[in-house]
Every structure is written in structure tokens, then in C-alpha cells.
Amino acid sequence: MKYRIAMWTSAGFLVAGFWALFAFATFPSGNERIRDVWTLVSLTCPIAIAGMHYPISLYEALAMNGVTYALVGLTAEILRHQPHHAK
């Protein structure tokens, strides 16, 4: 179970890193392209929503997205291992 939660955390870290690289790569015209994919960014990197209202550094965004994905993974693992009652 720890391995799977670590994989969820890594996935969250990588997703936030991908969006950061995307934003840096499209910087001069980034506002238009980010608006086009904002729904996808909001779904895959929920910390970006808070970043619209409060200044968040790249490192904070990477860490918080990893924590968010870890919590989602923990919830998924707990629900996956629910005990089945015998008939």
C-alpha cells in the first residue's frame, strides 16, 4: 500500500512539473494557451486554483500537488480494501 501511495505522490509531482514546464515553454503567448487548457489544469493540478488568488512558488505547487495526489491515492486504497462481509 505504501508503494502505491508513493506512486500517486510521484504522479502528482510529475503532473505539476509538466504544467510548470508547459507554462514556461509558452511564456510569451502563455496566457492564451493556458486559457485554452485551464479546465484540464484545474482538474489535474488543483493547487493552481489557489495560485490564482495567492502567490505560490513552484516548489510549493509541486509539493502540494504531490500531497493532494497522495491523499487521493490513500482514499482510493482505503476504499479498495474495504472488508467484504461474509454471507
Image: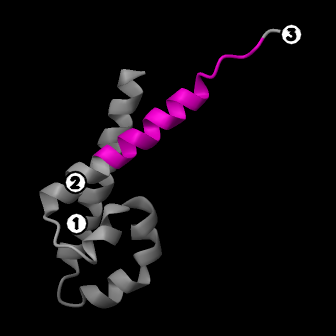
Image quadrant holding the C terminus, namely top right
Specify few, some or many for label 1: CA neighbours under 10 Å numbering under 14, 14-19, or 20 or more: some
Cβ–Cβ under 8 Å for marks 2 and 1:
yes
Quadrant assignment, res 4: top left
Circle 2 sits in a helix, a strand or a loop, which is it? helix
Q: Sequence order check: which comes first, mark 2 or mark 1?
A: 1
Read off the residue under disc 1: 20
**Given the image, on which type of amino acid does mark 1 rest?**
Ala
Read off the residue under disc 3: 87
Q: Nearer the viewer, mark 1 or mark 3?
A: 3
Task: Tell me the distance, in whole angstroms, between the alpha carbons under discs 2 and 1.
Answer: 9 Å
Q: Sequence order check: which comes first, mark 1 or mark 3?
A: 1
**Rendered residue at 13%/64% (across/down):** 57
Lateral position of residue 55 relative to residue 64, left or right: left
Q: Which residues are magenta?
A: 67-85
**Given the image, on which type of amino acid does mark 3 rest?**
Lys
Specify few, some or many for label 3: CA neighbours under 10 Å numbering under 14, 14-19, or 20 or more: few
